């Protein structure tokens, strides 16, 4: 599997070659001697790891390799050298599953959407990972064991590192606003590659008659790349700055104008960790008072409704 196709995953061979480099092997000859693999295989793997930025290469013939220094590489190096868990735990699509549930409990249907794995594959991975004590299963819901602090930290660091790389591959001047598992939000004034990303937050509200004039554009990337609904756009807007009454106001305005599916909105908010904020927002949309200092003043909201012709 080419890491440029699935930026979150590695083959076992790729991880084992990276381990040899972390342990001090510097040349193809060193890695061949340490791993027992052929020169042809090592050339192919080191090229893939170099192209992905997981390792660095210096020199031409007889090139030397070093572990990368970004967050992905350092997280992976720490995992491998710690011997806390076997390498097999993070090989291939097992890592996709773990990243999907790295921050929140999710059911198998949601994991299947995010990872693009078949339900039966997820069940097999879950059974194996439960035997390692890494995940806990409650019916169809899966989560990382709260006692496995090492795995939780690795997944959060690795996920953020990959998402930063995804952003940097698309813009040299991006700002990461939020990163969670297999998705992220970022803003930029200069986009070079739109592959796999969608406008979101205030940048997508013009599609619903709420225009903004700004040089900065907000984008969402996800491994599954689903079309965004107004509920998703409103949540992404909140995630860009959940402590701003103005930001909350425009999420409320969007949902007031388009209508919303309460069950879907709450479900999505749980996955992103802002369920309480969204509950308060729903209270205001239902005409009730919300005791949250980040909620906008009701009079200001009414003025906003009038400004955009929302009743």
Image (cartoon, helix red, strand yellow):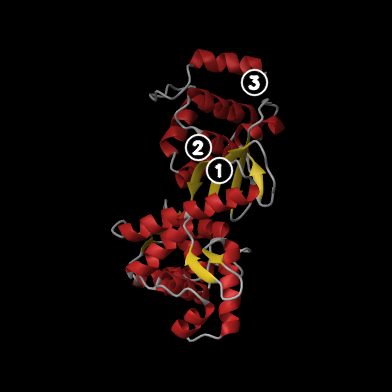
The image quarter containing residue 200 is: top right
SS label for mark 1 = strand
Residue most toward the left? 147
**Numbered badge on residue 310:** 3
Task: Kindly identify the residue that appears in the image at 66 percent across and 19 percent down.
Answer: 308
Marks 1 and 2 close (CB-CB < 8 Å): yes
Q: In front: 172, or 121? A: 172
User: Where is residue 114 shown, x and y percent of the image?
Assistant: 55, 56
Quarter of the image with the C terminus in it: top right
Q: Is residue 55 visible?
A: yes
Q: Which residue is mark 2?
A: 239
Task: Kindly identify the residue that appears in the image at 53 percent across and 27 percent down.
Answer: 247
Q: Which residue is mark 1?
A: 185
Quarter of the image with the N terminus in it: bottom right
User: Where is residue 211 shown, x and y percent of the image?
Assistant: 69, 26
Q: Is residue 177 above or below residue 90?
A: above
Residues at marks 1 and 2, CA–CA distance in whole angstroms: 8 Å
Residues at marks 3 and 1, CA–CA distance in whole angstroms: 28 Å
Whichever of callouts 1 and 2 sits on the residue coming sooner in the sequence is 1
Q: In front: 292, or 64? A: 64
Whichever of callouts 3 and 1 sits on the residue coming sooner in the sequence is 1
């Amino acid at each position: 599997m080419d890491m440029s196709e699935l930026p979150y995953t590695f083959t076992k061979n790729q991880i084992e070659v990276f381990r040899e480099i972390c342990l001090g092997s510097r040349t193809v000859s060193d890695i061949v001697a340490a791993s027992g693999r052929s020169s042809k295989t090592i050339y192919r793997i080191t090229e893939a790891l170099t192209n992905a930025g997981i390792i660095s290469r210096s020199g031409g013939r007889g090139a030397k390799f070093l572990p990368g220094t970004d967050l992905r590489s350092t997280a992976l190096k720490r995992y491998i050298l710690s011997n806390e868990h076997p390498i097999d735990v993070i090989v291939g699509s097992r890592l996709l599953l773990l990243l999907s549930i790295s921050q929140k409990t999710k059911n198998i249907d949601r994991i299947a959407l995010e990872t693009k794995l078949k339900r039966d594959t997820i069940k097999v991975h879950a059974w194996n990972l439960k035997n390692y004590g890494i995940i806990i299963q409650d019916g169809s819901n899966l989560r990382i064991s709260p006692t496995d602090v090492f795995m939780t930290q690795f997944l959060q660091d690795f996920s953020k590192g990959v998402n930063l790389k995804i952003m940097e591959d698309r813009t040299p001047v991006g700002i990461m606003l939020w990163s969670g598992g297999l998705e992220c939000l970022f803003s930029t004034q200069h986009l070079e590659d739109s592959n796999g990303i969608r406008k979101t937050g205030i940048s997508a509200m013009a599609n619903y008659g709420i225009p903004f004039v700004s040089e900065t554009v907000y984008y969402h990337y996800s491994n599954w790349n689903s079309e965004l609904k107004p509920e998703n756009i409103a949540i992404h807007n909140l995630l860009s700055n959940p402590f701003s009454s103005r930001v909350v106001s425009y999420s409320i305005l969007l949902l007031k104008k388009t209508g919303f599916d309460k069950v879907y909105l709450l479900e999505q908010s749980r996955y992103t960790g802002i369920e309480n904020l969204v509950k308060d927002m729903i209270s205001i949309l239902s005409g009730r008072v919300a005791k949250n200092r980040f909620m906008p003043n009701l009079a200001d909201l009414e003025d906003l409704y009038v400004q955009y012709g929302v009743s």
